Image (cartoon, coloured by chain):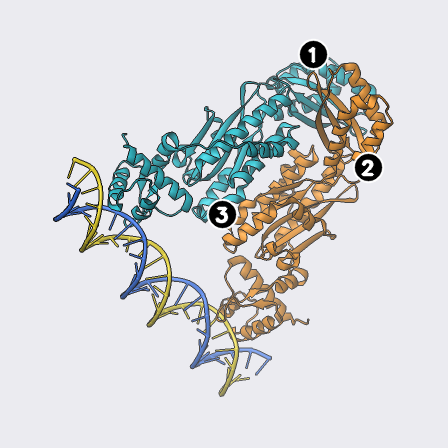
Chain colours: A orange, B cyan, C yellow, D blue
Amino acid sequence: MELTQRQQKILAAVIELYIATGEPVGSKSLCETLDFNVSSATVRNEMSNLSEMGLLEQPHTSAGRIPTEKGYRVYIDRLMKRPGITGDEKRYIDSLILPSAYDPEKLLDGVAKILASMTKFAAVSTTPSGESAVIRAVQLVQTSRRTAMVILMTSAGTMKSRVFHCDFDITPEILRVFFRMLNEKLIGVPVSSVTPAYIQSLAASMGDMAMMISSALMAVADAAQESMQSEVCLNGEINLLFYPEFGQEEIRRIMDFLSRPADLCRLLSKQKDDVRVIIGQESRRPELSDSSVIVSRYNVGGRDAGAIAIIGPMRMNYGRIISSVEYLSGSVGRMLTELMDLE
Amino acid sequence: MELTQRQQKILAAVIELYIATGEPVGSKSLCETLDFNVSSATVRNEMSNLSEMGLLEQPHTSAGRIPTEKGYRVYIDRLMKRPGITGDEKRYIDSLILPSAYDPEKLLDGVAKILASMTKFAAVSTTPSGESAVIRAVQLVQTSRRTAMVILMTSAGTMKSRVFHCDFDITPEILRVFFRMLNEKLIGVPVSSVTPAYIQSLAASMGDMAMMISSALMAVADAAQESMQSEVCLNGEINLLFYPEFGQEEIRRIMDFLSRPADLCRLLSKQKDDVRVIIGQESRRPELSDSSVIVSRYNVGGRDAGAIAIIGPMRMNYGRIISSVEYLSGSVGRMLTELMDLE
DNA sequence: AGTTAGCACTCTGACACACCGAGTGCTAAA
DNA sequence: TTTAGCACTCGGTGTGTCAGAGTGCTAACT
């Protein structure tokens, strides 16, 4: 697809004006914003050409033009200028993240909050997947006469706990034995291999001890399973209620989609690039056919770990939002790497 | 306010018909549902009386009647029949709660989910306040060469953790010393008294050890503060989008209110009774002037601990919902009591 | 005195209709 | 190739009409 210099300028101007006002852009009003002097008729001809190329469309015959998905795509890929994020903004963002930088889940939840309040869209983040993590430590704490808590720490920096119940009174000695046993058998083991089957075989290898410790082992398996799943943090869904382009019906569909962590996670995990924009139907999700998603994967210790994203109407200031998402993505990665001492 | 037998029946019938259909109730259609034979004119007269008493109102002059807040109040307090929850329902609910009954936060979050899906309204729950809890155990786990995690367990059954960083390499011996010290000084101490000031004085009493351990102590203080706050779990906000009585504007106001945990928590903590219905303006919250809240406090170990609630349009099936909330509230209390071994 | 039938009145919501204005596409001239 | 001019299209708004549902009131009835 060939676009003359002028066509590029006009396409960009239409999109930027439409993003700013939300109204279909007519030839006359566009003329005034252009930095070269042509008549509205000329602009009309060019707009007509752009329509034929599928970059612009008209909501109805005698209305101004609005960008198509393809139009946005061209704009984002080739025409848009991306304002870098300022030092002040960076400092502001950092000051907001820092307080929650002591735990992966809290951190990602905080990031989603910040992103939502900065962009006024809905924000999503996923915690690092613990799939490839190994068990770093197992702790035991007695919580009552016959119950105790097992705490599992992984190399992904997560900590999961489970309470388990015994049929006998737990003494410090028993707990010590349990502790030694669990640590001996489990430290360094990948969480992904701590399956019920694995626990079975472990129990079998313990002889008569197995009976006593079985509930603790089950608790460990449970915690290990949980530590593998990446958590999805959602924030700022309310923001979407304020965009007139979303009617009752769209809002419901989007909200419904957002409330399904599995689908959300799938959408974000498919992405490979550093920061990607998914416009409308490109997501192949009917619920998002009126929305755009800006997603960025982040790395921890040099490896792909999770994603942060925003979801909003197609009509958004892509340049600004992309910069924010990109910067936050980098920050998250750095902070998590530091938190886990992997640098 | 005196209500004749017939007025009571008519008021109840109007409210029940309105709840069922959502349409203002006219005299003629009401006549057909009444179990005694009177003409529509008679019903009209009685409805007129009920309007004068402020129990019914008309959206406009020539429309049917809808209940006022006062009308709902009278209905709920004196006229409504409350269907008990069936054994099947109980079993169903229990089977859903059980899987998350190992941790207070998970449990309450699960309860909110269940309540939202059962009632199709927005559901809120608060975790037990840890204000009066004492420290039950402190654990330390090394997470990297110079960082470790402190885990605080309280008598309220919660577990909070913080990572802290030292300026020196952490050895198992140092960790052991820290561990003995922290447990010696902190077990049995109320979390509410673990303030920065308290930590200061504790550090002072430790002499030259204080320097080394100070970051660990700060982490403990942090975790203690966090364990005091009760978490607010929110679920099913999306459900509210499906009630035609909520327009864009109302939805926004309600969602905005729901997104402020502090306000939400305040609303729920003011309640004293077992289960209470707050109709519209009774909440003294403009955001909720079109909604009803059904809230029930729950007890743990015989003491008031937290609340669960639903928020929906005024037009709801109060009897059914109250029963559900009441049952869940009891279940939560029982499970938490058991979880914390306080029975 | 309470109840009922009848009737005039009120108000909403749906529909049709006309009109305005913004914007277009086309044509012919520059 | 660009521009001015013009006829045309279409959505949105405002007005008028009409049917339907429901009321309040009055007078008759039990």
Q: Position of residue B196 (x, y in %)?
A: 62, 20
Nearer the observer: mark 1 or 3; the answer is 3
Compared to residue C23, the image places residue A99 above or below, namely above
The Cα atoms of the two marked residues, 1 and 3, are separated by: 60 Å
**Amino acid type, residue under disc 2 in the picture:** Ser
Label 1: which residue? Answer: B205
Label 3: which residue? Answer: B242
Tell me the residue at 69%/33% (across/down).
A103
The Cα atoms of the two marked residues, 2 and 3, are separated by: 44 Å
**Amino acid type, residue under disc 3 in the picture:** Phe
Q: Which chain carries label 2?
A: A
Q: Where is residue B139 in the image (x, y as percent from the top left)?
A: 73, 21
Q: Which chain carries label 3?
A: B
**Amino acid type, residue under disc 1 in the picture:** Ser
| Discs 2 and 3 share one subunit | no
Badge 2 element: helix
Residue B56 lies in quadrant: top left
Residue B233 visible, this angle:
no
Label 2: which residue? Answer: A193
Compared to residue A340, the image places residue B178 above or below, namely above
Compare residues B185 and A126 and report the one nearer the observer: A126
Compare residues B320 and A213 and report the one nearer the observer: B320
Tell me the residue at 61%/50% (across/down).
A311
Badge 1 element: loop
